[in-house]
Image: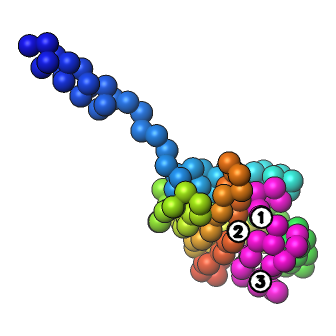
Amino acid sequence: MTRTLLLAVVSIIAWTAPAQAGPAEDATAVVTTWLDKFNAGDAEAFYAAHADGALIVDEFAPHVWGGPQSAQHWLADYMKDAEARGISGGRVDYEKTPIQANSDGKSAYVVLPTTYRFTQKGAKMAGKGSMTFVLTRSGKDWKIASWTYSGATPTAE
């Protein structure tokens, strides 16, 4: 009887214990936190989330950024492109559940469905797409080693 009761208690504890996040979930949380900070206009958090020399691929020229301070160069080019095309209020909305997320604990691969929203010359625009991230561990922290945005041409909302 005692053994049966003990097994029942252990089973209940195991069943109700909160799941521990694994490395893929941790990396996904880093990505979504980074997107939230980007959407809030926190440039310093944007820079800090990237490994120096991160490779970035995006839809506007020059389309690829790499080398020292690549995140800073990307953001400066994004701002120039947005100004030239009359874009303001750019933000990346994302779904909480990734299309794919996996990790070996040293590196991670995360793909999120996204919608890029902005106002262009007074018109609200949106383009559905995805962002793919590769992260690497730097000590205890995850750093974005690479990301790319891929999406449809935005249309009026």
Q: CA distance from mark 3 to mark 2?
A: 13 Å
Q: Amino acid at mark 2?
A: Ala
Residue 64, disc = 3
Residue 155: in sight, yes or no? no
Q: Amino acid at mark 3?
A: Val
Residue 11: in sight, yes or no? yes
Quarter of the image for the N terminus: give it. Answer: top left
Q: Secondary structure at mark 3?
A: strand
Q: Check residue 61 for magenta coloring.
A: yes
Q: What residue sits 88% from the left and 69% below the top?
A: 69
Give the crowd class for mark 1: few <14, some 14-19, many >=20 residues within 10 Å: many
Q: Secondary structure at mark 2?
A: strand
Q: Which residues are magenta?
A: 46-69
In primary-sequence order, the first of circles 1 and 2 is: 1
Foreground pick, 91 / 124? 91
Is residue 117 toward the left or the right of residue 95 in the image? right
Q: Amino acid at mark 1?
A: Ala
Quarter of the image for the C terminus: give it. Answer: bottom right
Is residue 152 toward the left or the right of residue 43 in the image? left
Q: What residue sits 66% from the left and 75% below the top?
A: 148
Q: Position of residue 143 (x, y in %)?
A: 71, 59
Residue that mark 1 sits on: 51
